Image: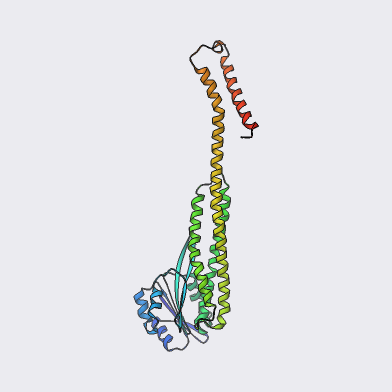
Amino acid sequence: MIRAWHADGNAAREVAPEEAVRLAVSGPGAVWIDLDCVEPEVALELLRPLQFHPLALEDMVTQINRPKVDDYGEYLYLAVHTARWDDDEPTLREIDMLIGRRMLVSYHDGASRATTAMHEVLPRRPELLSRGPTQLVHLMLDVLVDNYFPIMERIAGEIDSLEEEIFRPAARGVHQRILRLKRGMSGVRRIIGPQRDTILALTRDEFGAIPAEMRPYLRDVYDRLARVGDLLESFRDESATLLELQVAMTSNRLNEVIKTLTVIATIMFPLSVVTSYYGMNFDFIEYRWKYSWVYIMGLLAATAGATWWYLRRNRWL
């Protein structure tokens, strides 16, 4: 699906993609062309009149899986990623953008909350595009970074849940949950680091396509993304601690089981000696006594009690 917007003055209207390309070439106003799940051949044919560099177009239609920014003089190529957290795993989606002074081209596979929000807000705030596409880019990056914070809350809640689960006697599957959480955080961290550097590059004065008045707003986006990166580093340390604690708790529970079994075996060993002694086929005086079973049972109970007392006295129980 291709959606195109044109903003001129105080109004923004949705136009046909071909008209948006024509307006981007000859003006007036500014245009935004959003390519969602469009075949690369169709996208390249539509954008041919804009004379973008072949490498920029190739990067745009290819999933490079790494945020970056490239300067082509009159325009920038920018790749960023959105993220969602589903079933202890992140779902990452790449958004590629070509940013000029009067045009913005975005390319992505599947609907994104950042681009969807822009389509919703643009009719109410046409100045986001009419004053230059960098304002629209800033708002898109702002929404993109905002969507990372619910993921951080989800991870923090999962870590708290795992901390409580570890100390429960009947905890099951905690080890697998911790490993899934670590893998999910690693996937997000691989994106956050380069993306933070990419947005930091936009805040410098090395790109002519980014007006000076937009740099403070982009620095604010960078600061919040840096906070997300710091939270991920903290969560990584906590998850590693959780894994070590879970292994220690499992070892401790195993030691308790072995201790219990050892105590039972230790108590039963003297009883086995007594029963073996009286179980041999000999004629003992105790066998001819009417209440011999009372004697034998009392002897067994006294032996077990003496063994238990000895273990308690040495604080082995």
- Classify the position of the N terminus by image quarter: bottom left
> Would you identify the image quadrant in which residue 268 lies?
top right
Left/right placement of residue 88 relative to residue 53 reads right
Is any atom of residue 170 visible in this view?
A: no
Q: Is residue 239 above or below residue 286?
A: below
Q: Is residue 274 above or below residue 25?
A: above
Is any atom of residue 156 visible in this view?
A: yes
- Classify the position of the C terminus by image quarter: top right
In x, y percent, where is residue 249?
56, 46
Depth check: give the residue in front, 260 or 155.
260
Depth check: give the residue in front, 115 or 255.
255
Q: Is residue 155 above or below residue 45?
A: above
Q: Is residue 39 above or below residue 164?
A: below
In x, y percent, where is residue 100?
46, 82
Depth check: give the residue in front, 150 or 80.
80
- Please tell me which residue is depicted at 53% across the width and 63% down the height of the picture: 151
- Please tell me which residue is depicted at 39% across the width and 72% down the height of the picture: 62
Depth check: give the residue in front, 37 or 80.
80
In x, y percent, where is residue 38?
38, 73
Colour convention of the picture? rainbow
Residue furthest to the front in view is 314
Q: How many marks?
A: 0
Residue furthest to the right in view is 313
In x, y percent, where is residue 60?
41, 75
- Please tell me which residue is depicted at 55% across the width and 76% down the height of the picture: 218
